[in-house]
Amino acid sequence: MTLNIQTVPEIENIPESKRVPILRACEGKEDLANLAAGNPDMEMPDFITERLKEHIKTGLMPYTHYYGLPKLRTALSQNLEDEWRIKANPETELLITIGVSEALYLIMRTILHPGDEILLPSPHYGSYYQNCIACGAKPVLVPLDEQNNFDPDFDLTEKAITPKTKALLFCNPNNPLGTVWSKEILEKLAEFALRHDLIILMDEIYREFTFYDEPFSIGSIPEMRDRTFTLGGFSKSYMMMGLRTGFVTGPAAVMEAVKKLHYCITFCCPISGQIGALAALECPTEEMARIKADFKNRIEVLYQAVISISGVTCAQPKGAFYIFPNFSAFGKSAMDLAIDMIEKANVIALPGTEFGELGESHLRLSVCARPDRIKLGISRLQEYATKYLKN
Amino acid sequence: MTLNIQTVPEIENIPESKRVPILRACEGKEDLANLAAGNPDMEMPDFITERLKEHIKTGLMPYTHYYGLPKLRTALSQNLEDEWRIKANPETELLITIGVSEALYLIMRTILHPGDEILLPSPHYGSYYQNCIACGAKPVLVPLDEQNNFDPDFDLTEKAITPKTKALLFCNPNNPLGTVWSKEILEKLAEFALRHDLIILMDEIYREFTFYDEPFSIGSIPEMRDRTFTLGGFSKSYMMMGLRTGFVTGPAAVMEAVKKLHYCITFCCPISGQIGALAALECPTEEMARIKADFKNRIEVLYQAVISISGVTCAQPKGAFYIFPNFSAFGKSAMDLAIDMIEKANVIALPGTEFGELGESHLRLSVCARPDRIKLGISRLQEYATKYLKN
């Protein structure tokens, strides 16, 4: 008799990513122009590649310290103090993780009791919602104000609060929206969090891609130190996605529990990614300036092309790799539109619903392909719109 | 007012590893001979290093497929069929993970309901216990028969079964014991699991280091396919520890849920580790034969030296990197003995209690240091025994 293994409901109930039907629609198709990926088709800075080459040559690939190479934690702590204005003791308040992904899961699993509610200003990054479910918590979507560049509406946010509300989780600069919450908004959010006794989880993986302002971290506000977890990494800034190296800093007492869970789940992070991260911290700043200017330009070109399509509206992009245009004038669901574009125009976008139900009728478009492929994608999108999008 | 963040009890209750006081005792000491590490101080085979160099040169470090590079899963599936005699569909039954660590957590978190009991033949690898706690399950230690080379006592195992017993988890070849359960024992275990409707989690990370027999996988028994999760990796066999690449195969229905959790926690595995793993699968077999013969010899030398100490007994080593000698004749606790050896003899061993209370009065000794350091460690241990161990 076959054993029927009962899986636990939290894991069984994790919703499947909307990326899956998109991948399926792409199967067997050739010459697709990819405006969907968050995975830049771009080389790491040579400075980092050279360091990695030096390391590989030794042939030595030991486990590292469970919580991250001590010299990486020391250098990162200094960088957080100098650039982010965040104090993070490298021994007690800092953990190197498998990207922001692991960091987010560790924190959520450590602080979310069953039934706790977590506010997700939305549209939101898809796995935030999935992580809530995986931890037995309840994600509460708080609509962002699209008319106002997806800034938060604090009255609406206040209405979403219940005695079960534990935390608020946001990505700034934002994936999928391409917007940035300003210093003023983050200061209001800090007051809001203090007033309502909320924990803040701030995913700053795209921090280096803040195009028009100085980046500002809510974790740098002294009153917020006891309640803010700041998550970051090297994947996006230095084209080190596949080296899987991120970090989290937060209050020491919680970090102690978080580290124990990290030891259970991943034991230690890959040594190559940590050596790459240390190189990234020492990389000449011109390298990062060059990459940032490139992405700012790419995004501006994409944005101008998309808003020139009659009937399409779009918040002005201010950071990260994305724009999140609104196609509601054409009466198609986001998924239908994305699938139709693959089939009729050979161009891939992600349906806005990958980022929650409030993303309906939107697409997430990215600039991670090679420049000639982005150009091709844009012209295909424009041609598709002319032919098929009637309002 | 400072926010006091309540962590969830499962995570708070994860016991701290006994490695921590050992690390603390080593602080500030120089010239220690390390007989504690499971982290071989040895280069990867050149074949793998060369492949990694080729990859680094491109400077491209993209995210990979969430579940592992398709060509790695295909090659691994073939290897599992040819060598392990395990059928694992690369699409539905195989997942690439951050070492065995992540694989183990994913499976346990997916199948263990709160209060479920899991049998740990013990002494056991420390994080097995920690993972049970992290998943809200109850670890039930089943003493192994030390008089009989740590083989299982099925009568005793049967007595540990309750209506809550869900699974049995074992490492074969074994860390920390250095022993191997034979094909005959694994066939008996299969009958036992079928009779009691148990799931088997088999950690085979040391499979290539089976010194005297052909390795045998319980997952290769057809009747066990619906209830066995086989965990393995490339870390130990190919000196790729820090590349963090392992895998798990098991029944498709559970693997589907496991993959969703993997997507939440780690998104995808490091590309360098996966490229290394693919190289390992294609690596000339003489390389592995050389590494295995080297470890077999190292272990034999260590074993002979340790059993020559009057009063010490030790199960005969048959696999992995370890021996687990019994020092109970001397009346010291395992932790006291390990600390005392660091202080008086500059040699590091792990206290047996890192592997559960049934490891009391034992030490785990390893052969992962450079040969001259192992030699030094052995002579210091012998000198220490002559001077301080009286029974």
Image (tube, coloured by chain):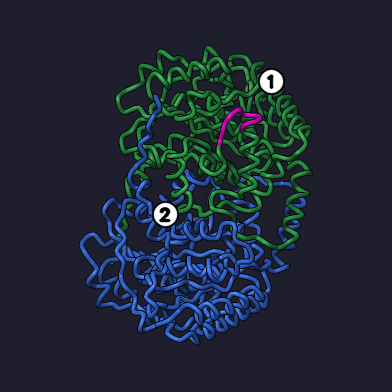
Chain colours: A green, B blue
On-image quarter of the C terminus of chain B: bottom left
User: For residue A82: magenta?
Assistant: yes
Residue B317 place in picture, x, y as percent:
48, 81
Chain hosting mark 2: B
Q: Amino acid at mark 2?
A: Glu
Task: Please indicate whether residue A326 sits to the left or right of residue B363 in the image.
Answer: right
Q: Secondary structure at mark 2?
A: loop
Q: Amino acid at mark 1?
A: Ala
Mark 1 neighbour class, 10 Å CA radius: few under 14, some 14 to 19, many 20 or more? some
Q: Can you say whether B26 is above or below A272 in the image?
A: below
Q: Residue at x 60, y 35 (%)?
A: A342
Residue B127 place in picture, x, y as percent:
43, 59
Q: Which residue is mark 1?
A: A305
The residues colored magenta run A81-88
Q: Residue at x 29, y 71 (%)?
A: B194
Q: Residue at x 35, y 53 (%)?
A: B133
Residue A89 place in picture, x, y as percent:
55, 38
Distance between mark 2 and mark 1 Cα atoms: 56 Å
The label number, if any, that marks residue B16 in the structure image: 2
Task: Please indicate whether residue B347 sits to the left or right of residue B7 in the image.
Answer: right
User: For residue B75: magenta?
Assistant: no
Query: From this viewpoint, is residue A348 visible?
Result: yes
Query: From this viewpoint, is residue A356 visible?
Result: no
Nearer-the-camera pick, B354 or B71 = B354
